[in-house]
Amino acid sequence: MHDSHDVRIPVGPQHPALKEPESFIITLRGEKITSVNIKLGYNHRGIEKACEERSYVQDLYLIERICGICSHSHSTCFAQAVEEIAGVDIPPRAKYIRTLIAELERVHSHLLWLGVAGHEVGFDTLLMYTWRDREVVMDLLADITGNRVNYGINTLGGVRRDVSPDQAKAVLKALDILKKQTDYYVEIATKENTLINRLSGVGVLKHEDAVRLGAVGPTARASGVNSDVRKDDPYAAYGELDFKVITDNHEDVYGRTLVRVGELYESYKIIRQVIERMPEGPLTQKFPRKVPIGEASSRYEAPRGEDFHYVKSNGSEKPERVKVRAPTLANIQSVAHMLEDRYLADMPIVIAAIDPCFSCTDRMVSLKKDKQHKECLTWGELRKYSIAWHKEHGFDPDVLNLKYQRGLKS
Amino acid sequence: MMALLHIFIFPGILFLVLAGFTAEFIDRKLCARFQNRIGPPWFQPVADFIKLLGKEEASVDEADLTIFKLMPILAFTAAASAIFSIPLWGNKALSIFPGDAVVTLYLLTIPTLTYFLGGWYSRSVYSMIGAVRALTQLFAYEVPLLMVVLAAALFADSWSLSEIVNFYCRHPVYVFSNFLGFVIALIALLGKLEKVPFDIPEAETEIVAGSFTEYGGKLLAFIRLSLSVEMVVASALLASVFLPWGLTLHPVIAFLLTLFKILFIIFLISLFRSALARLRIDQMISFCWKYLAPAAFVQVLISLALKGVLPR
């Protein structure tokens, strides 16, 4: 496979194309990519484990710091799971405020992505313009929640701050500015030839592949997969709001751009409805310090795709297990597929097109040396080890197997 | 004595360095304003240069140090020596000989070759890919550029820049026949100066800084300076071939006019730079050979036809 004509070029862990450390070792023949080797793990912070050592309220703030862009997504997703275990239904006004912040976050995340995409194809003017307009949203978020990045508006059982009529007015005013600017970006995206040339036909992900590789969010929707947790499994106030799921059939980076720009318009629509229909009432519901025994999973449509949290409670003030599957983890599998047989110049934009958040994604598996006396395990050994570990902790996977086989028979 | 003055002070090294800094500042400031930024203060290019001069030098162990260190100096020298055959303040340049247009064009090609060699002998993967790209790109834009200058020269029936300028000053209206050539030369110039949309050899998000990845300190300072000087000299070349009006006026006015033309070309470069996205190398090559080269050929045909028809 590797002959003397192949050049291996390391993109990352430190590289101008990447905003976070991650390693893509790319094998090139001329300007064409022959293979990509992705290595994750440079950003692992052990947040899931750290959650088990802290109380639920502390976890909420820790979880919020998983990601700097979609912090509200993670904290809402976690809060929803915990609220489900505790059987607490949050007040309607809190639901609307959570939705408002979620959509403002989506707007700032998509504007940020548009700028990054421009930068990756050498179109820095787009970066400067979108990031200037993004400040409008950032200022709104700072005004409403008190913070630009980690908003800290969620609490278990509701939200911590109210939205005053003045703030609501400011949001509506900002929407007009943003809508005008978005019209301008649509014009650029549909008319600027160099940009279209760089985006269309690049990073193709066919509909079947998107389904097979489990892509989520705008990446999947640009391949014609009609999936959006806000519609499929409504949470917060989304069930009562009127909006469309934007899909596209370009199946490439250009399609992903169109989907994101289209979602900006939908977000403006949602924000307007939220401001108009926001019900009066309390902000929080009383929440118990100790969460009853139980487990729950929660889904949330983050700007990058479906975010998934699993929380298991053992009846104490600390969770037994917290599991986070950020959207990038679902999308990263498709990147290697999209890069096959493409040009080196497409690499930055293809990676950027899934809007990766590596710090959300990084996971680590470590093997304790004293148990197995070796660092490398084969798949079979790992499976045996896992079954033994679960049996030791009071759970017999064989029972599941029996149930599964009985299900097959009947 | 006069020769030394010309070489070191005006229009030689000192003038070119100052003009290079000014051109870099204007380019950066304009680009910043186009992008809705404030942009750097006027002394920023000088400050950058001085700061780089004070930096430590480092290189890859396997690099060929002789070539690695020689190339930035060579690039600067070649770009600077190209100025002497370009008429700046009258219809006579300092050095006139038959064929000086070709020599000027080739002196302006040398910097690109030095970037290739410097990048190749840095022995870093990013530099090597950047170096190969620089050379690939050279073959794409150099032919159209040469052809449109050839077209202007054919019309004027001379291979000397001063003669060409002289001819067009006698027939100012004939300059308009070269309009297509000017546009082509401007696009080729973007490739030569490695500016967006043709900054493929130093595409930041793909190969860090291309050929210049391993350069730092004094050497990088000289590379940047030679790029700025190249911008001034190449703009002056374009100004004298395609916009040769007013060079027969009083030398001071003619010189100011030349500076204004250079400024205009730099303005156009900045405009392109901020309005377009970077192309891929395959798109760049196919654009140059499918559209730019045939258009340049059309320009040659136009010049030949007009030469036969119009009075001289």
Image: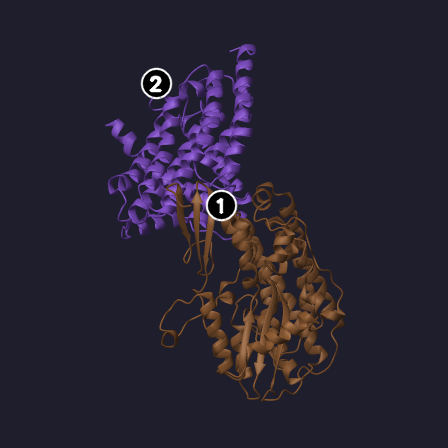
Chain colours: A brown, B purple
In the image, residue A208 above or below residue B157? below
- Foreground pick, A158 / B265: A158
Per the image, the residue denoted by label 2 is: B97
SS at badge 1: helix
Location of the N terminus of chain B by quadrant is top left
Across and down, in percent, residue B218 comes to 29, 47
Distance between mark 2 and mark 1 Cα atoms = 44 Å
- Foreground pick, A325 / B270: A325
Identify the subunit bearing mark 2: B
Quarter of image, res A12 = bottom left
Q: Residue A345 carries which label?
A: 1
Whether callout 2 and callout 1 share a subunit is answered no
Question: Residue extending furthest front?
Answer: A409
Q: Which class describes the residues within 10 Å of circle 1: few (<14), some (14-19), or many (20+)? A: many
Across and down, in percent, residue B44 comes to 39, 50
Q: Is residue B43 visible?
A: no
In the image, residue A197 above or below residue B167? below
Image side of residue A186 versus residue A121, left or right: right
Image side of residue B287 versus residue B3, left or right: right
Q: How many marks overall?
A: 2
Q: Choose mark 2 or mark 1, whichever is in front.
A: 1
Q: Can residue A64 be seen in this view?
A: yes
Q: Which class describes the residues within 10 Å of circle 2: few (<14), some (14-19), or many (20+)? A: some
Quarter of image, res A403 = bottom right
- Foreground pick, A402 / A208: A402
The three-letter code of the residue at mark 2 reads Phe
At x 56% / y 77%, what residue is drawn? A398
Across and down, in percent, residue B189 comes to 46, 34
Across and down, in percent, residue A321 comes to 53, 79
In the image, residue A291 above or below residue A247? below
Image side of residue A3 versus residue A90, left or right: left
